[in-house]
Image (cartoon, rainbow, N blue to C red):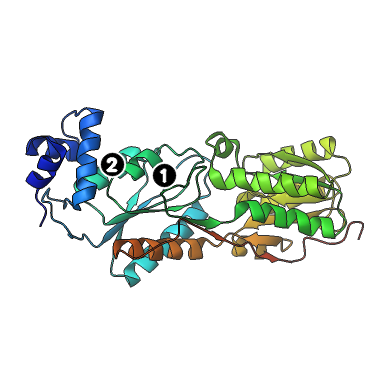
Amino acid sequence: MVKITDVARRAGVSPSTVSYALSGKRPISDATRLRVQAAVRELGYRVDGGGRGAAGHRSKVLALAVPMRSGIHVPVVTQFAVSVVTAARAHDHDVLLLTQGEGEEGLGHVARAGLADGVIVTDVQLQDPRLPLLRSVSLPSVLIGVPADPDGLTCVDLDFRAAGELCVDHLARLGHRAVALVGSPPEVYVRRTAFARRLVEGFTTAADRHRLASVVHPCGTGRDAARAIAGRLVRELPALTGVVVHNEPLVDPLIDAFEELGLGVPGDLSLTAVCPPPVAASARVPVTSVAVPSAELGTRAVHLLVRKLSGGPVPGATLLPPRLTERASTAPRGV
């Protein structure tokens, strides 16, 4: 059993300093805190919820960080959460939900207090401010999303870049020569959210490869936003006949907005989406889509985390290949 005195000896500080560094109850210099964290990792020291440390102690709890930020689509977040809870229960773990906006403070508290055996992190940004903390503490983690630098991290996600390419490839095969991407709300891009940025990269790469005229615009939600973006796209790209939507709540409002402008789906305009299958299948015109596999991602994240906890090997990054399902919203150009 590793004791707090062992950590103190390894870090070259007093046991009370170790306690303060882990609990955050008193200010500790960055250099001292990093020495303590390094000693904790090397010795396998863990702290339970009452402040007692022991190597190998397990809380049988997994934390799920789902920051409730503006621009997120709550039903998708709910699907992630339900799949994580279901998979965790299959491994005899409960789930602690963390919803704080920025997330570092909540994650730091969980790590210091030993409230969970590991953490699953969602809404990952390319330069995510939570990553230095995740790399510095002994709390095992899995990210649903891939940052710009995934070195030393365990990540799983849909290959959103390939998803963007797949949608454009489908429209190009149908003969469409002018396409648009209606993206997530603007704040999602301002935060440099990884999945949204990568989908834009895939869309523009495929459009350039096929030599298509193309535009990309973020968009809010609601019928007014749909009408505004539909009118803007028609003005900017008069030859527009193909649209990719990466904004689940806009699917039906966009179909309505284009029809108000005299563009029927799919007779005048083919529409594809990257969204959960129920959203695409239940649209007023069933939408050709690349599925966002929320349940599979949540389940895989739990399995990866449990494997890490047991000391088994895990891959650095797992990207699920996109799958496109054709429905009634796409047709050859001019048909």
Nearer to the camera, 254 or 33: 33
**Which amino acid type is marked by label 2?**
Gly
Residue 86 placed where, x, y %? 38, 67
Residue 6 placed where, x, y %? 10, 46
Classify 128 as above or below 298: above
Q: How many marks?
A: 2
In the picture, the quarter occupied by the N terminus is bottom left
In the picture, the quarter occupied by the C terminus is bottom right
Residue occupying image coordinates x 22% and y 34% = 33
**Which amino acid type is marked by label 1?**
Pro
Asked which quadrant contains residue 189, the reply is top right
Residue occupying image coordinates x 77% and y 56% = 169
**Residue 67 marker:** 1
**Residue 181 marker:** none
**119 left or right of 1?**
right
**Residue 108 marker:** 2
